[in-house]
Image (cartoon, rainbow, N blue to C red):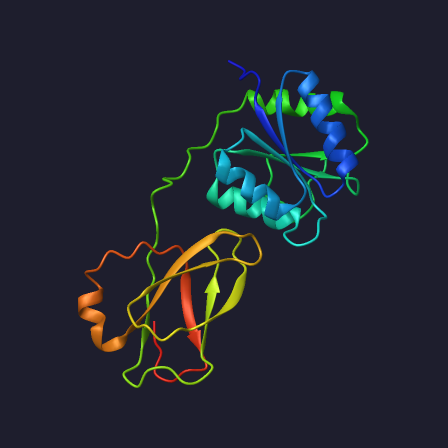
Amino acid sequence: MPRTKEEILIVDDSPAIRTTMSLALSEMGYRARIAEDGRGALREVRQGRPDVLLTDLNMPGISGFELLSIFHRRFPEIQTIAMSGEFSYSEMPPGVTADASFQKGQGVEKLLQILARLAQTERRTPLNSCAVTSVIVHRGAHGSSSGASATISCPECLKTFEEPEGSASGRLFETRCPHCDYSIQYAIVQQSNQTNLQTSQFKLGASVRTQNAPGFSY
C-alpha cells in the first residue's frame, strides 16, 4: 500500500530551487525539509530521518555524489533521488548510488511520478544505529614525537582531517569533523597497555591512524 505524506529532504545550493520545490511538494501533501548543501543535509538527518532524499549532484563541499554514497552506506532505509540539469531523468550518471533520477526543469508532475513509484517499492532494512566500531591506535613505548598528529577518517562523510595527537595516553578525545560537523570520539593508547585496553569499552566513532611519530602500529 502506498505511503502517504512522506517527508522529503530537498538538498540544493540554489535558494530559489529549494524554496520552489519545497512549496510545490508541501502543496501536494508532502512534508518538505530543506538543506543548502551536503553538510546541512547531514545535520538535518541527525535531527530526524526523512523518507526520501532529493539532492542536487553538483554542490560545493560535500557533493551530491558523495552525499548519496553516504546515505546508501549509513541510511539504506532512506530512498534517494539524484537531481541535476545535466542528464536525462531516464539516465543515471555513472557512479551515482540513487534509487531514481530527476532532471531539473521536468516539472513537479514528473517528480510526483517518481515519488509515487518509489512509494510502491519496499524499503531497505535500516542499520543498527547503536552499532559502533571501536578502533584504537597504539602508541609505541617511546611516546610521540614533537608535532605528531592523528589523521582521523570521519565515519559520517568519509573525509579525513588532521588533529594534534595530544599527550594523554588512553584518554578519550572528542572532536568535530570540519567537513560535516559530525562529533567524533577517538583514543590513542600506549602499546604497552594493549592487553588491558582491549578489555575497555571505548565508544569510538572513527578510525584513527597517527603520522610523524615512531613506533605506531594498528
Which of the 4 quarters of the picture holds residue 41?
A: top right
Residue 159 or 45: which is nearer the viewer? 45
Residue 64 or 203: which is nearer the viewer? 203
Task: Name the residue located 72 percent from the left edge and 38 percent from the top edge.
Answer: 91
Give the mark count: 0
Up/down of 27 relative to 198, above or below: above
* Residue 86 appears in view: yes
Q: Quadrant of the C terminus?
A: bottom left
Which of the 4 quarters of the picture holds residue 197?
A: bottom left
Which of the 4 quarters of the picture holds residue 22?
A: top right
Task: Name the residue located 60 percent from the left edge and 50 percent from the top edge.
Answer: 66
Residue occupying the far right of the picture: 105
Up/down of 48 relative to 190, above or below: above
* Residue 103 appears in view: no
Drawn side of residue 54 relative to residue 175, left or right: right
Task: Name the residue located 24 percent from the left edge and 56 percent from the top edge.
Answer: 201
Drawn side of residue 96 relative to residue 171, left or right: right
| Residue 59 locus on image (x, y percent) | 71, 49
Residue 77 or 122: which is nearer the viewer? 77
| Residue 17 locus on image (x, y percent) | 76, 34
| Residue 212 locus on image (x, y percent) | 46, 82
Up/down of 91 relative to 121, above or below: below
| Residue 157 locus on image (x, y percent) | 53, 53
Up/down of 66 relative to 188, above or below: above
